[in-house]
Image: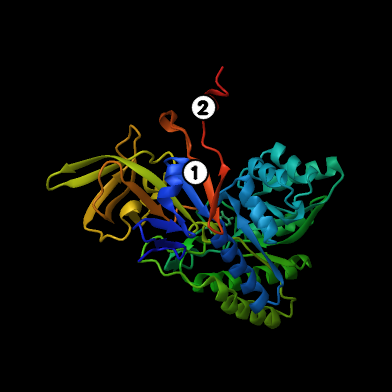
Amino acid sequence: MFVSENLSVNEKGNLTIGGVDTIDLVNQYGTPLYVLDKDLIRKNCKKFVKSINKHYDGNGLVCYASKALSCKEIYRIMKDEGLGVDTVSIGEMYTALSVGFPAEKIYFHGNNKADEELKFALENKIGRIVVDNLQELKRLSELAVKLGVVASIMLRVKPGIDAHTHDFIRTGQIDSKFGFAIETNEALEAAKCVVDSKNINLVGAHCHIGSQILDVDPFMLAAEVMIDYINDVKNSTSVTMSELNLGGGFGIKYTSNDDPVDYENYMEPVSEVLNKKCSDYGIKTPFIVIEPGRSLIGPAGITLYKVGARKEIPNIRTYISVDGGMTDNPRYALYKSKYDALVANKANLEKTDVVTIAGKCCESGDLIGENIKLQHAEAGDIIAICATGAYNYSMSSNYNRILKPPIVMVSGGKSRVVVKRETLKDLVRNDI
Ligand SMILES: *Cc1c(COP(=O)(O)O)cnc(C)c1O
């Protein structure tokens, strides 16, 4: 009945998340409201960790891709669960470090890292810098020499696999702004440059093949291609890379049409590929890093809105206007992303309507979704959009000077604020 395992309906007919009544949450904290279920986040972390422990002798690290949602509390949870984190800016590194996240477990990505960011990473002993291009490599080497440190790096590689949902293609992915292509030999040449660079230690290679991938096959193929690459690098430079980062992109259930692979079993077929390939080449199996983002937190989140208006345009559509929109969830405007929705205070009723849920911005494209099945909603009802834990808060904006909602976390039947609601004062804080 619900897309996420932590959602249910109570005797009042209200939607619950992690056992907490969503209408009580609305009464206490207001709308719009992001709600995250900490217990489910932890459970998801444990599934990925278990997958590496059980199927790959624990020889790896699960890194949370923190662009999916970055705030102090998330880094605290990931630290507690023993995960690493993947960051893409000084802001994400700073937030992680601000709660004492172990620097050696932080990976720093990005296709255009500023000198300030590279310097910050080196000074703070960030574990791995994932180098994207040769200009960056040169700047990093110069900075490392200047600071008298050695940078441990991975190379961002384009393996020529482009995967999304159930589809993946083998070639034709050289047109990406990220990394070095294998098929043009660019990636091999890059490894040679690294070996010749001062104060740089080439630890491994990284790839990220897509997002919302629902099958394991593209990851098996990526593992194969990357071991081939590691072997090629070994043969032409005598450096054996000891780490392989296979990126993230593990799909989640946004709607009942999505059927992702069970994360607990995920590493089993990938390990088989890694072990086989490495023994064929006579190289040591690498330390594996995987970087789940949305799969750790997406299903753990919902967003609650209050309905302000219902507008029926005969023979065309019915708009349900809510008190948020593309400012707190730009994903429909960006990608036409699909979400499951329900009326939280009528969660036990049947979904009889098909509606368009619209935000409150001055923008026709400001929609949460179209053709959404919903219980009959009227002004004053509370709408829940499911599986919004990832890429909602982290992509939010103040367009139309709309205030960002708070994040409330539920755990063990209790709730608390982990990010405060923005205030009007926050809005003008930097205006002169
Ligand atoms: C976006 C991204 C991830 C996480 O992707 P999800 O789809 O959220 O799992 C991991 N690694 C890199 C390099 C990314 O860019």
- Pick out the residue farthest to the left: 315
Viewport quadrant of the C terminus: top right
Viewport quadrant of the N terminus: bottom left
Of mark 1 and mark 2, the one earlier in the sequence is 1
Q: Nearer the viewer, residue 43 or 165?
A: 43
Q: Residue at x 43, y 48 (%)?
A: 24
Cβ atoms at labels 1 and 2 below 8 Å apart: no
* Residue type for callout 2: Leu
Residue 233 image offset from top left, x and y in percent: 71, 66
* Residue type for callout 1: Met
Q: Is residue 35 left or right of residue 89?
A: left
Element at label 1: helix
On the question of residue 414 being in view, the answer is yes
Which residue in the structure is indicated by mark 2?
A: 427
Asked where in the image residue 283 lies, by quadrant, the reply is bottom right
Which residue in the structure is indicated by mark 1?
A: 395
Q: Nearer the viewer, residue 298 or 181?
A: 298
Residue 213 image offset from top left, x and y in percent: 47, 65
Point out which mark residue 78 bears.
none
Q: Nearer the viewer, mark 1 or mark 2?
A: 2
Q: Residue at x 25, y 45 (%)?
A: 378
Label 2: how many Cα within 10 Å (few below 14, some 14–19, many 20+): some
Compared with 270, 387 (above or below) is above
